[in-house]
Amino acid sequence: MLLRALLFAVAGVTALVAPANSQILTVDHPGQYTQEDIARGGLFYNAQCFQCHGRDGDQISGIDLRRGLFRRSQSDEDLAQTITRGSPGGMPAFKLEPAELTGIVAFIRAGFDTSASVRVGDAARGRALFQGKGECASCHRVAGQGPRVAPDLSDIGIARAPAVLERSVRDPSSALLPINRPVRIVMRDGKTIRGRRLNEDTQTVQVIDDRERLVSIIKKDVRSFDVAKESAMPAYSDKLSNDEIADVVAYLLTLRKQ
Amino acid sequence: MKRTSLLASLILVVLSLRGDAQVTSDRLLKAADEPQNWITYSGGYASQRHSLLTQITPANVKNLELKWILPNQVFGAWQSTPIVVDGIMYVTQRPNDVLAVDAKTGRVFWQYRYNVSADARVCCGANNRGVAILGDTLYTGTLDGHLVALDRTTGRSLWDVAVGDPKLGYSITMAPLVVKDKVLVGTGGGEYGIRGFIAAFDAKAGKELWRVYTIPGPGEKGNETWSGDSWKSGGASVWVTPSYDPVLNLTYWGVGNPGPDFNPAQRMGDNLYTDSVLALDPDTGALKWYFQFSPHDPYDYDSVQVGVLADITWKGTPTKAILWGNRNGFFYVLDRTNGKFLSAMPFVKVNWASGIDDKGRPIPTPQPDGQPTWPGVQGGTNWYSPSYSPRTGLFYLSAWDGYASIFKPESSQYVPGRNFLGGGATPYAQVQGAPGVRVGRATPINTWTDAAGNGAVIAIDPVTGQKKWTFKQFDVTDSGNLTTATDLLFTGGREGYFYALDARTGAELWKASLGGQIANGPMTYAVDGKQYVAVISGNSLITFALRD
């Protein structure tokens, strides 16, 4: 009882010294962003910000986005807040997907450098190529249609910049993200699993197999584990003309459903 | 019988709450005599993170089971190492809360909440790494640059002093160090153009007793290593708890990067004492010696690692050494009496320097524009606590291997309180457009894979500089390391696995999949004769002990 009384007393005191907390959000180290984020942000900038801020980000007096000169923002959170809330009497509020917001901040912090310059053709023609001559739809799924063996492209227009899309079409192996590499796993009991890697850690690997099943494997049960660097997708640089590739890129850029 | 033991434990609890078992400075000196407690950030002044507890052994470690979990309500990497004193754990959580917890059950006695000023500026999240204790008082630093003293029985603030101005980017994220009657802290803010400093405060009243700038001012030796006025905004932050040698009466402080981080052309010279270790007299702040690991650094290679004090035999002579696995990718052995360089060996892939000369100075090999530099901006290791076992004679650290960044220097202007980076660094990915390793784990899917670098615990023999073993992890690791007198090594990583390894061979003996990234140092303690191991994974502090 003595102990309980004492604990109550302590708890009472604690309640008196508990002011409201000011929340500070996590931020990555400034100056460090992925090329993927930067590229995605570049895409969004050219679509949404370019008109007012200009190609070089210095079209509005007192602001030079590329060089990091802002009116009131300092941290990444500040920037994100200005973008999503707008500023009184000035910039409108933008409603963005989280990946787009991360991307635009990364693009601004990277000084607008995406090194991207790509020809974009006609999306309707590109769609026809995707479903017809290109046979893309025989492996890739879009908006609930098609197989799941290759990555689902329903939001690829948000996730990838035009330059990366073009490279993926021309030479898929050079643009294949390491996580998506094809794997061949032979278990200790002789069973073989072929598929696309979804995730991996020290102890386990997760794949979607060639029968579209999600499979998780414990590495200690594995006899051999091969990760191929070559994509299973053919290179289209000699299958489609330059104009056709530009059309396919245009179509892929319209795929923005998350 | 039962009633008697209950009464005895009640009396014990009451006594400790009343403060009858004060943590005197003598107890801090002799921390090894009470292995049931963990009374400083690094488990003792030598910072070996080596416990003398022996209940958990390689033979029975497989019988560890979950005892309790303390969830944190504030999201973000939880980097704190708890301390435990006589059955009570004191741990910090974001942003600057302190909790007193029953170390046996995980139940909370009190929670102190500090209201952080909106002026606080921190580069890398609302991090705090822990508290220090003296007498019945706890000490913790804050994101807005204050040092706060708390009554450890009630959690009430006893005093609160402003150490550095948050409007200029000063913050405190390290656990303070108590030496004798003083509380010692350093200031963060290396990305904001601060002029870093270390200060000592009277533990009783909070009065500042001395202050040493980590960048020498005009007229002081070392100021000539900065061009023009660049010393004024040159960074040199301090954000990890130092070690202390009571016989030599020296504290050993790791100092952070120069500012602007990535554009050394704005600060010509060696930029002392950035990326250095400083040996300071804790009574006066007098600088006894220094050693600079990375002069004129363009890569943000803070030397904020914990320097581990170990007595080793160096070329046949008993030597008081300080062991230092540096962010720049080299493992150093120095003589801690005088700072003399003894050896340096790379422990990860390195291409920013071709080696270290016989005076300890790197031979730089800057990479062409746009080409990757190994190790990358987060380094071959970072602030993650290493361990040293006097039994195995091995030094253990968490490393990022095969990880690179592309550095891009740019001119930047110093504006008080704003980022002062001088360009940026992009994590290098072998496939163009692929994600690189991030600073923290932001997603449960490892999209960067080992193509962008992998983590490892590496055991190094300090006498030869050679790796004894490597425990490779698929993702990188921000975990600290703990060894015990039964030759166990506890470690974690971003993937959320908590491991017990054989400290002699690196063999995996036990693991638990905790899910969240482990970004603190595992620690161990005992209550009522039972040994516990505590680790923070994601937003949970998780405690294990042998099955009852």
Image (cartoon, rainbow, N blue to C red):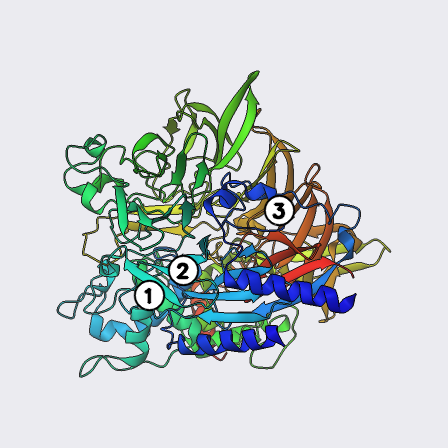
Label 2 lies in what chain? A
Residue B305, percent from left and from top: 45, 42
**Where the C terminus of chain B falls, by quadrant?**
bottom right
Q: Tell me where residue A100 appears, x and y as whole percent.
A: 40, 72
User: Residue sitting at 55 percent across and 74 percent down?
Assistant: A7
Residue pointed to by mark 2: A28
Q: Amino acid at mark 3?
A: Pro
Q: Residue at x 36, y 52 (%)?
A: B203
Proximity of marks 2 and 1: CB atoms separated by less than 8 Å: yes
Asked where in the image residue A185 lies, by quadrant, the reply is bottom right
Q: Residue at x 64, y 39 (%)?
A: B470
**Residue B346: percent from left, percent from top:** 50, 32
Q: Could you say whether the residue bearing mark 1 is in a helix, strand or loop? A: helix
Distance CA(mark 1)–CA(mark 3): 44 Å
- Report whether A236 appears left or right of B290: right
Q: Reply above or below: A120 against A183.
A: below
Farthest residue to the right: give it.
A189
- Relative placement, left or right, of B419 versus B469 is left
Give percent across and percent down for residue A224: 76, 49
Q: Which three-letter amino acid code belongs to the residue tagged 2? A: Asp
Residue ID for mark 1: A76
- Residue B504: mark: none
Out of B462 and B437, give the one closest to the viewer: B462
Q: Is label 2 on the same chain as label 3?
A: no
Going by the numbered disc 1, the residue's amino acid type is: Asp
